[in-house]
Amino acid sequence: MSRGTPPRRALRDRGGRARSNGGFTFAEDPSIPAPEARLLWAADIDPAILSVSAVPGDPADPDHVDPAVLAPWLTLVTDLAGREQAVLSDGRHHLRLDLERGSLADGAVILHYHLHGVASAEPGLLSLRRLLDLIRHRRFAAHLFPPDPRIDRWLLTLRVHDAIAAGASHREIAIALYGEERVGSGWLGEAESLRLRVRRLARDARGLAAGGWRALLRGRR
C-alpha cells in the first residue's frame, strides 16, 4: 500500500462469532498469507492495546497526526458500537489501537492517550513509544520489538499441534522434528529422551489449543 492511499478496511464478522472463535474482534479471511493478515485481538486478551481518542487537528500543529502517513500499515474495522479499532502492521510487527471516539480516516487529528494505573499502564506505555516512533520515523523500530526468547518453542509446539490434528503418531512427529536416524528403531528404548520430549510438546500443544494461548498475549507464560 503506497503512502496517501486510504487505510484498509477489514470486514468484521457482524454475527459476533469471531469473539468465540479465538478472542479476536473480526474474522480475517483465512486464505490471506500470515504476513498480510491483520488480527485485532479483544482488549481483554491483549493488554498492549492502546486506547486513544482522535479529535480533529490543525495540520500546522506539531502535535497533529496525518493518518495518510500511517496508511501503508493501517487497517481499520468498526465494532458494533460504531467505534474504530485499528492495527498497524508491516507483517512482522504490529500495534493495536482502540479509538474511544473519533476516526483515523478523516484527516489530521490530535491523539489523546488513555492510560491508567501502574501495572496496567506498562504495556500501553510500550505501545505508545512504538506508535510515536512509527509516526516520527515511518518504520517500526526493531529495538522496541525485542524477539521473544520463547518463540522457537511456541513454533515447535504449533507444528506438533498440526501434526496431531493430522493424525500423526508421536513417533512420526519425532521423525519429522529430529530425523529418522536419531529416532531409529529404538523408539521404546534408546530414543526414550526424544519420546518424552515429544510427549511434553504434545501436552503443551493441547494446552495451548484449549485456551493457554491467551497467556502468551498476556505475557504470563
Image (spheres, helix red, strand yellow):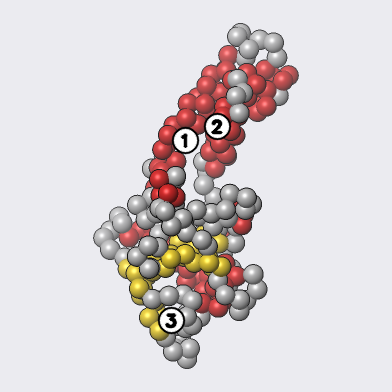
Question: Is residue 215 at least partly visible in the picture?
Answer: yes
Q: Do labels 1 and 2 touch, CB within 8 Å?
A: yes
Dividing the picture into quadrants, the one containing residue 99 is: bottom left
Describe residue 22's horizontal placement relative to residue 137 as left or right: left
Residue 26 in picture, x, y percent from top left: 46, 56
Residue at far bottom of view: 60
Between 82 and 108, the one lying in front of the other is 82
Describe residue 40's horizontal placement relative to residue 190 as left or right: left
Graded by Cα atoms within 10 Å as few (under 14), some (14 to 19) or many (20 or more), the crowding at tag 3 reads many
Q: SS of the residue at dot 1?
A: helix
Q: Amino acid at mark 1?
A: Ala
Q: Is residue 220 above or below residue 44?
A: above
Mark nearer the N terminus (1 vs 2): 2
Graded by Cα atoms within 10 Å as few (under 14), some (14 to 19) or many (20 or more), the crowding at tag 2 reads many
Residue at far front of view: 15
For disc 2, the marked residue is 161
Residue 51 in picture, x, y percent from top left: 36, 66
Q: Amino acid at mark 3?
A: Val
Disc 3 to disc 2, how far (Cα)? 44 Å
For disc 3, the marked residue is 109
For disc 1, the marked residue is 209
Quadrant location of the N terminus?
A: bottom right
Disc 1 to disc 3, how far (Cα)? 40 Å
Describe residue 158's horizontal placement relative to residue 216 as left or right: right
Q: Amino acid at mark 2?
A: His
